[in-house]
Image (tube, rainbow, N blue to C red):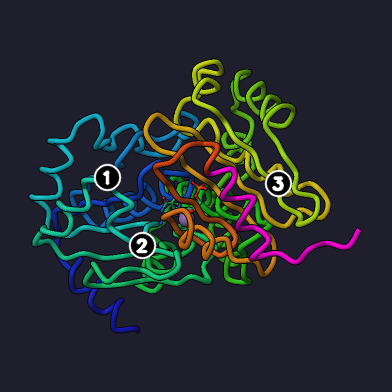
Amino acid sequence: MTEEIQQLKQLLSFPKEITIVTHRNPDGDAIGSSMGLAGYLQKLHHNVKVIFPSEYPAGYGFVQGVQRAIVFDLDQNAARQAIEKCDVIFCLDFNGLDRVDKLGESIQFSKAKKVLIDHHLDPEPFTDIEFSDTAASSTCELVFKVIDEMGDRAKIDAATGECLFTGLITDTGSFRYGTRPYTYEVAAALKEIGVDDYRLADKIFNSQKVKHLRLLGHCLANRMEIMDDYGVGIMWLTRKDYTDFDIQRGDTEGIVNYMLMIENIKVAAFILEQPSIIKISLRSKGDISVQEIAQKYFNGGGHKNASGGGVYASLKDIKDKVRKVMPEYLPKLNK
Ligand code: 5GP
Ligand code: MN
């Protein structure tokens, strides 16, 4: 048993007040790992609260317990109180306090024991017990691993398993990238427990609104530029697009990946002109690290092949910047 597991066992040896926090704009892995861990901790008779810094996409409403989560943006007092009053804070699927907005301060100054479970590069040292593994497909995979190493695999029921399987599906693009042999072991174990993975895939992928497909069509038809010489796809949405297409949180998720379906495209950049900030999503194939690009130029980070950032600048400036920096990272293609 590792030292971390021993420490965690001790920490959880009698019922505690526990708060689970994940990153802003929670995705399938953030939501699934939080609700999955909550399900497990409740089995150990802890009192558990889950906090999301901002709202979760409505499509994830099917995840067990998600409706009871506290959303900081909607109820700051409840979120702050949960953090102030708890004994243990689990920080899931993020690697630095700037990923949870103003909650970062509350976490930093809280006297609670803090536990990190995360798979992002370069975690900051803000927790007491760290389960950081950048080779893991997802935080859900790591939550399973931690529970298993605690000797508690039998405490994962089908509903909790479905939470964890959700992150496996979403962070690997349905097992197309980011996997290792252990990822499939976890998937197999969860299916054995009774997870209905077909139902989950249907819930996750076939629950789009008409407006989502229209938005995707708009992006592909009118908002895409290909840098043929370097194998880069650039896409963007303007502030007006946000109004015209009634874009809500989560509605743009996944669109950036479409550019990687084009032959020879190695890097995809999706630039979003949000009310006060320009957000950028970067994706790559193979050895090109968009994490480096996000960190160096766009005030962000993430994973080698999937990163993001945010900058205060104009849409035009960021488009120009992307066009300018890509040749530093990609060889010119012979045609
Ligand atoms: P997305 O492009 O889907 O928003 O994010 C992809 C990955 O990049 C996520 O795993 C997330 O952790 C990371 N990421 C996105 N935005 C930011 C950001 O503003 N700062 C940092 N450090 N990471 C980000
Ligand atoms: Mn993740």
**Secondary element at tag 1:** strand
Tell me the kind of residue under disc 1.
Val
Q: How far apart are marks 1 and 3 (CA)?
A: 37 Å
Taking the image as shown, residue 64 lies to the left or right of residue 81, namely: right
Taking the image as shown, residue 241 lies to the left or right of residue 302, namely: right
- Which residue is at the front of the view, 64 or 26? 26
- Residue 127 in the image: state x and y as whole percent: 23, 68
Mark 3 is surrounded, within 10 Å at the Cα level, by few (under 14), some (14 to 19) or many (20 or more) other residues, namely many
Residue 304 among magenta residues: no
Marks 1 and 2 in Cβ contact (< 8 Å): no
* 179 versus 323 height, above or below: below
Residue lying at 14% horizontally and 57% vertically, measured from the top left: 16
Q: How far apart are marks 1 and 2 (CA)?
A: 18 Å
Tell me the kind of residue under disc 3.
Gly
Taking the image as shown, residue 203 lies to the left or right of residue 263, namely: left
* 82 versus 206 height, above or below: below
Quadrant of the drawing holding the N terminus: bottom left
Residue 319 among magenta residues: yes
What span is colored magenta in the figure? 318-335
Residue under circle 3? 233
Marks 1 and 3 in Cβ contact (< 8 Å): no
- Residue 96 in the image: state x and y as whole percent: 32, 60
Q: Residue furthest top?
A: 244
Residue under circle 1? 50
Residue under circle 2? 95
Tell me the kind of residue under disc 2.
Asn
CB at mark 2 closer than 8 A to ligand 1? yes
